[in-house]
Image (spheres, rainbow, N blue to C red):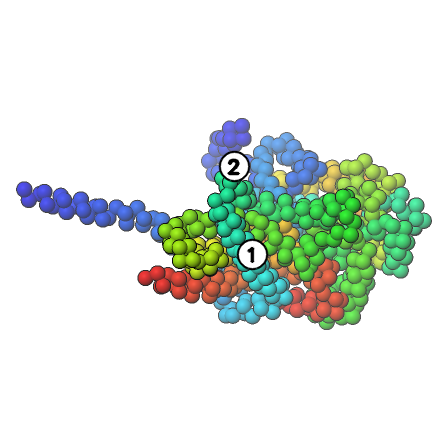
Amino acid sequence: MKLIKQLKLSAAALALSATAAAAADVEVLHWWTSGGEAAALNVLKNDLEGQGIGWMDMPVAGGGGEAAMTVLRARVTSGNAPTAVQMLGFDITDWAKEGALANLNDAAAANGWDAVVPEALQKFSKYEGNWVAAPVNVHSVNWVWANKKVFDDNNIAVPTTWEEFEAAMATLKAAGVTPIAQGGQPWQEATLFDSVVMATGGPDFYQKALIDLDPEALGSDTMKQAFDRLGEIRANVDDNFSGRDWNLATAMVINGEAAMQIMGDWAKGEFVAAGKVPDEDFLCFRFPGTQDQVMFNADQFAMFDQGGVVSPEQAALATAIMSPTFQSAFNVVKGSVPARTDVPDTDFDACGKKGIADLAASSSSGNLFGSLAQGYGAPASIKNAYYDVVTAFFNGSFDSQTATEELVTAIEIAQ
Amino acid sequence: MASAPAQADFKTRLQNLIPKLVLAPSLAVIFLFVYGFIIFTGYLSFTDSRILPSFNLVGFENYSKLFRLSHWTTSITNLAIFASLYIGISTLIGLSLATFLDQKIRGEGLLRPIYLYPMALSFIVTGTAWKWLLDPGIGLEHTMHLWGWTSFHFDWIKNSDYAIYTVVIAAVWQSSGFVMAMFLAGLRGIDNEILKAAQMDGAGNWQMYRRIILPQLRPAFLSAFVILSHLAVKSYDLVIALTGGGPGRATELPATFMYSYTFTRNQMGIGASSAVIMLMTIAAIMVPYLYAELREKK
């Protein structure tokens, strides 16, 4: 069927003009294969099909997109790049540096992207002042997801400082509940550490250490203190955490086996899928000490250059991605918040509304930071060096002093 | 009649030529895809390649970076532990199983495939199955607790210091049956007459094994060593399925290190240099061994 359609379309294109040789299809490489994500992507697919543009799906499973990036590399090397690719942070910059991405300035100007996309996010969607990617959503990682019943049973209020957080963990441990549900994969441990660094050193320190990669800040006592705090959190995680997936950790909170999980807002999807209601069954609050900050990552679609021009299909796809209706419809399903700040929050639940408000507030007050663990702080090589050290510490191979020293060396080598 | 010898000559020439012609494409392909890419990787290890290959030479920088990485030191140490235990234990178990099976016991036809069967599984399956078995929350430890042995404690797979030994356990389980089959074939190849003569000369069982059978198994030892050591060095799938390189980075091996640096961390230069080091390591062990073994045959 697809082939026939393609043939028909290209026949039509040939009939219309002899020069327009490009097939009117978009091939989209992405890693949104779970049920909710696929449903969300369908919104986009239908939108494009309404405009007569065919959708060639190219899903490569694997959260975080590592497998998808490997496929992409092979496709680009063999000179057969897909039309559009889901990408994160510095991957976009890296590919733009190779000159592989198409310029989306026309679509951006026509739809006023500059005014509505938060500036911190634009740094990644643009390369040397040109739009090269269309952001779909903004996830933020400094969230704590808590089981409300467990909190109520132990008379715990939402902690707002590190000391209150410590006290809450102690109370929960004494009551025989696992205080923190943690998944045991390097990216999850590093995602948690992002929040801990922000809470311990504040936004300026976070900027200096994990975004500017200043060796002095990386090796400072503040960093050591952050590792000490991470160690404290580790002591409140059950012993069987290593290798656990993030959604299994979320399930522990949903079932009340554990009280809290520190995880990005994709965890909300698990609560919603289990039929839980925000503020009634579960709580969402910012990691204590990071109430004013939003640490984000964002899924974006980058368009690959097809011979020096942006094809009309690519422009249509980018425009469709950035339309407020799609941004709302998609993000309600995905659990994230829209990448543009002017989308109405009427369809979102309490946590989504809070996320949208936080994003707007932090963007205007300069408190919006990229998450290093999610590829929005530094390129992949540095992100992984950071993972190496954090995960070795979290699994007990280093003490906090060694970890601080290792962090300086590892990041220096990766640069 | 002048044409007949010429024809015969042409035929013989053709006969000589055909094997070469048939072999030529595969030889060319091997030269390009094996040796060509070894050279290419070696070249890349001296460049500043990151996301895609680059041809900008930087000398030995990648190698000096590589040996400063604690992650690489861990991988190398793990390979040393894993390879020596894996090869040693597999050979030992394989040899004992083969010896026991060779005692003309009943049911050998049934036992042999049972021991050989794990080899039919891929390392991914072995890794996943052992991951569940060894997981303290659902596997062996949990079962023992359910049966009432509550002091039973076996959480190596979750322990950074012991996790590498669980990789050894799974790999040995997978391969010792195969090693057994190789030794069994070797044992069957030993001339019965020699054994009978030895028996007549009054050799005991132990002496017979030590002085006659084991020395004759030398080729089997060589094949076992060659096969097991290359399996050990290229171990990737087992670690990925069993521990994912964790807990933390505690079970990373050079192969997983090389893959992640080259393909997911955008540090192709360092990845290539680690591949070169792996090749050198294998060459350093295998070349003298093969040389010694093959020379003695002549």
Q: Residue at x 43, y 58 (%)?
A: B202
Residue most extreme to the left: B1
- In the image, residue A219 sits, relative to residue B189, either above or below, namely below
Are labels 1 and 2 on one chain? Answer: no
Q: Alpha-carbon distance for marks 1 and 2?
A: 59 Å
Percent of width and height locating residue A377: 69, 58
Q: Which residue is mark 2?
A: A23
- In the image, residue B277 sits, relative to residue A81, either above or below, namely below
Q: Secondary structure at mark 2?
A: loop
Q: Nearer the viewer, residue B68 or B169?
A: B169
Q: Chain of mark 2?
A: A
Label 1 sits on what residue type? Ile
Label 2 sits on what residue type? Ala
Other-residue count near label 1 (Cα within 10 Å), few / some / many at <14 / 14–19 / ≥20? some
Q: Is residue B118 visible?
A: yes
Percent of width and height locating residue B22: 30, 46
**Relative horizontal placement of residue A196, taking residue A93 as reference (left or right):** right
Quadrant in which the C terminus of chain A is drawn: bottom right
Q: Which residue is mark 1?
A: B89
Nearer the camera: disc 1 or disc 2: 1
Q: Chain of mark 1?
A: B
Residue most extreme to the right: A155
